[in-house]
Amino acid sequence: MAVCVAVIGKDNSPLYIGGVGNDTSTDNELSRQWLVHTALDALEERLATSNSNTTNSNTNNTRTDLRDLYLGLLYSTDTHKIYGYVTNTRIKLVLVTSSTSPSGSNIRDAEVRTALRRLHALYADAICNPFHLPGDQITSSKFDKQVKNLMLNNV
Amino acid sequence: MATHPSDFTDFPPEIILKPLALIGLSGLDALNNAVHKEIWDAFANNRRPDRAAVRFKLLNNTFEFPVVKPKRNSYEWYIPKGILKKNWIQKRITLIPAVVVLFYDMEWNDPQWNEKIIECASKVQSIRAAVEGHATRVAVVVIQSGQSPPPSEYMLGAERAQALCAACEIQSKSLFVLPHSDHLMGYIIRLENAFYDIAQNYYHHETKNIKQHRDHLNKTTHQYLFVRHQFKLGFLNELKQDLSTAHKHYMHAYNNLLETRTVDTNMHEVRTVAGFINYKLCKLLFALNLPRDSIAQLKSHIDRYKNRVGSTELLFEHYAWIARQYSAFGELFDEAIRAGLPGIQTQHPGFYYQYAAQFTVKRRQAMRSVCTEATKYPPLPDPLEGIVEYYGQRPWRPGRLSADPHDPQKEQAAVLALQYNERMYNHSAMIISFLGSAISQFKTFHSPRMRKQLVVEMANEYYYSADYGKALTLLSHMLWDYRREKWWYLASHVLNRALQCAYLSAKIQDYVQLSIEALSKFIQVPNKDKDRIFRNITAIMNVTVPQGEPDVPLHSHTKATEIWRSAIEKEPFLLNVDMVNISSFLEVKPKFKQQRYRMDEIIEVEIYVRLTYETVLEGVKAFLTISSATETIEIPITQDGSTTISLESSKVKRFLCHFKPNPLDNGSELHIKNISFILGSDKKRKIAMNFKIEDNKTLDSTVHPELLHFILSPKADFEFDSIVPLTMASITSRECKLSMSVQNSSPALQGEWFPTTISIVNNEDRPVYDVRFTLGLLSSPDNPNPESVTELSLKEGESQPQPINMTAGTINKSSEHSLLFYLKTNRTATATVQIKISYFIDLPEISKLECIKDFTTKITVIKPFEISTNFVTMNFKSISKCFVDDPFIVMPQIKILSPWNLLIVDTELEMVDCFKYSDNTKPPSCISGLEVAEKNIASDAICIQAKYKPKDTPTRVGLYNIKWKRKSDSSGLCVMSSTALSPLPIDECPIAVEVNYPEVVEVQTSVPLKCTLVGKSNTPIRLSLTVEGTDFYMFSGYKKLTVTVPPNDRVELCYNIHPLLTGNTTPPRLQATVLGDNANQEIVKEMFDKIFPQNIFVMPKYNK
């Protein structure tokens, strides 16, 4: 399903970028990073608008907390679709599917939502490691394996 | 609209131009006739969008209309040679007007009317002859002077107009009169709209004609004509400004074109025309405010033609065509947004420009794969020369429909020519142009990161086109952002490219800076070859040409080597690199050892340096720059006494700098401004790595050393990470070694000049000189404004302005200096006195060092006594009010609070106006010269009486002044304390009563009791008096009588009373009732009650 999954910190620095693909060449890694990095534009815009909406009405403070963490489809290009998810601590999760492959183009929104929720859980598990330094890149091989699994399992 | 470099895929201008109904104006001599020129300008100039969608063309006499082709009755044997003729649109928009308007100057009452009408008719006839075959309409405008004709000639005008219509063979609605007067513009707009109506009529007629052809067509041979006719219908409807119908016809044309069979030979033509029609469709959809449909149309268009590649030898043409579709759409979208369509972050023109750029990149790739052999242009005759009648057809085989190439040699030469042209084409310029448009769009639509990516792509494009300088500029700007967001992978990519650019353009400064950053642990370099980069830095310091970067174009590389050879020997020989903003292989943390230094201390700065790159740096010189309020100093960092230091990787080095503070900087702050490391200090070219420290830079709080090193094997540089830099320290003055003692007899009493002696002892080991004292008062919470109530002085009894300064000159070692000052305060609160001592001392290290010390001493101030007042009658009975002219006694009671014995020197009552002393002279004080101790109470007594009843009850009886001093004080200066005594209400009585009676009588002895009534008012007062007898007394005199008390005169009543019993008795009392006026009743009664005795003591009688 997914060709790339990324975890981005609250200061917009990349914490983890994982991709499945036939090749792991530099070009592929580069394009993946560009893709995720540019997705931050759309993510930030979404967050900014949802924030300004809630600040307009102070009574909706509780709604801010309850807002859906899943942001849905951020945007799509000819080749990829990019979905976003933001945790309460402003950790951004990005999932990229390929629109050219049949499994990626026919994906349903609910599937992506589930996948991102699971990714959120995996991320939470990974940073529970006392030896992990918050804000650092996630280097855990277990996390990597689980995320790769997540990407492939949904194919 | 952005202009992009043109190529063969450009849309011809007639496609891009918005079609407007063409109207020919004839008979206007705009050159020679001022009136005509004005009319022409009004038509043709300043056309605002709200005016009718028409275009005017000035026709001169020699204008020729295109020849009409003979009408075809049957299409049976007709085979079209192409889809769209190139000249058809041109003819419609410039050559065949929908209406030709003849302007003619003529007044209805013209004397030569008959000649005029004939001339006009002949002109119309000649126009008719010229347009022969076209359905172009003819209209006549008569230009008149604009003066309204006399009413009698109304009929004449109508008649003559009719005559003119008849002569010219035009309908009356095609005849217009243009009065040339004030409101020319209004007439012109009305005329314009009338012409527009006629033009619409004409285009409608034309569409009908074309529609008629359809019946003659069949799908097998005339597929092209289906497209052509529908296109023409669409275009005519566009001229008519019927946009939705135009869209419908274009859509038919587009669909018909899809049905045509495409082979390699006609592929180019089909997609060219498809591109035109798609362009028209998208444009119309935007104009109809259907932007989503427009986007969908483009998407499906690209999808349909994406795979219709055509000849593989000309693959680049396909990509060029797709790129053009996208860029043209981008321009349309951009135009629509300018016209008010809202764009959003995920759907705006930038994406289409980006696609255009991407496909241009593909075009270049295709060119590289297919055009490698096209090294030179084919020999003459030029296969690309020739006139092409149809859009998208090839010049070397015009009008041929058959799929097989009729002349393989010519075909080959032509392909070669196209390939050669493509090879020579500057793709980079086009890509850069598209990217530039995209970048500005992404910037507008809040996508800074997308923009950055495109900028990097643009920089890459500059790199490919060997414009390394521009590429480097772009990349170094972008590097900053990626570095800041810690996208190190992307930053590495950008950095490596920038390094290549810097190398190829031989920019030493940039090259060194980028190389230094490349050695950072965050940056990945190709082939993991950081050693090469380090060697290159060393090479530059040694003034040798660095080794080339990998993967650079070969020809640029040779050129770069040459530039390097000439540049390496030249300036600059000192390269300054600002290290704060880049990540590098050197980390520095400076730290003042203390936050605060005293003047006589040596200031120490610790500098921790960590080298993260695996090397040993030798011969490094380092400087620390410190700035203070007065100066900026540079201190060399030393290692074992040597000014050159060496740094090793994975070791944290600690250096210590120390320096003496400048005496002028007392009380100011020191800042570490910069730490610079100079690499290659022994080499010809030096690199200065400057770590500038901003004052307001917030510390990086994300580093948690304890977490960073919460691992099984602690790293050696734990220490480095835990160091918190301290870049600021303050300088305070040297500690003062004087001691002070205070002598006084506290507490001070309110109001007195209270002496205090301070003694300063010099505990320094050498004399101090130029000693200065400053006395001042400090405010405290319970005494916020001490200056307003407290005075300080060096001399008793004289106040001096605060603060008081004095000098004491030199004080020798261990000697003492005393100082006496006085304090006087009017508030019973603690007064805090600050004694500031400043002096100079010569120390072995620093001469003339100023030392300052503040001492404070607190002085409690209390009240010396408290005064309460009693008011009593002459017989010492307490009263709560007094009557006018009725004397009473004021008894101030002085309760001593002072712990010190006091001497009351004198007292005095200073009364308010309405009182006076009852005695004629001021009585002496009863308690003058009295000595009192703590808790004693001294009572004074002064007899006074009220003079009159004031309007308002006075707030006090008067001021009670006490002159006093401490008993121990022999100087004779007294303190005067004044206290306000509490008020006493004053009342007025119309009569005064005096009673004379003995205080003590013997039993059984008659005594007189005389009562005198004195009239106080200006009127006589009649009183009814009764005597209230008691059991204790017998009495003689009137028991009940009525008296009249005359004004200011007196009445005496005499009684004898005879006590019968002993003891404290109540004598008989007179009761008075005022007759007549009742207002004074109460007061008279009160007066009588007060005056008559309550008690008389009756003694028993002794028998002697």
Image: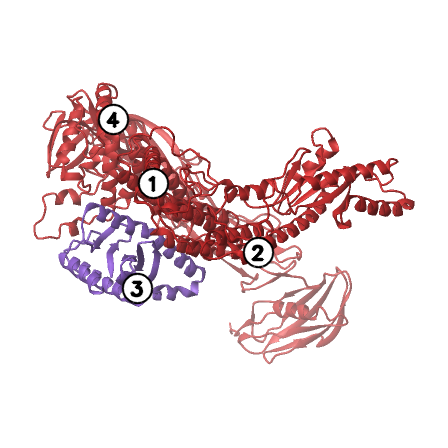
Chain colours: A purple, B red
Label 1, on which residue? B455
Which label is found at residue B506? Answer: 4
Count residues near mark 2 (Cα–Cα under 10 Å), then give few for <14, some for 14-19, many for 20+.
few
Q: What chain letter is assigned to the residue under label 4?
A: B
Number of numbered labels in the structure image: 4
Q: Position of residue A33 (x, y in %)?
A: 25, 49
Check if mark 1 and mark 3 are on a common chain. no
Disc 2 target residue:
B211
Q: Residue furthest right?
A: B152
- Horizontal arrangement in the rendering, residue B572 relative to residue B833 (left or right): left
Snapshot quadrant of residue B613 = top left
The chain carrying label 2 is B
* B905, B313: nearer the viewer: B313
Labels 2 and 3 in the same subunit: no
Q: CA distance from mark 1 to mark 4?
A: 22 Å
**Decide: marks 1, 4 in contact (CB < 8 A)?**
no
- Residue B641 rendering spot, x and y as whole percentages: 11, 25
Of residues B867 and A137, which is closer to you in this image? A137
Kind of element beneath mark 1: helix
Residue receiving disc 3 = A106
Callout in the foreground (3, 4) = 3
Q: Nearer the viewer, residue B300 or B472?
A: B300
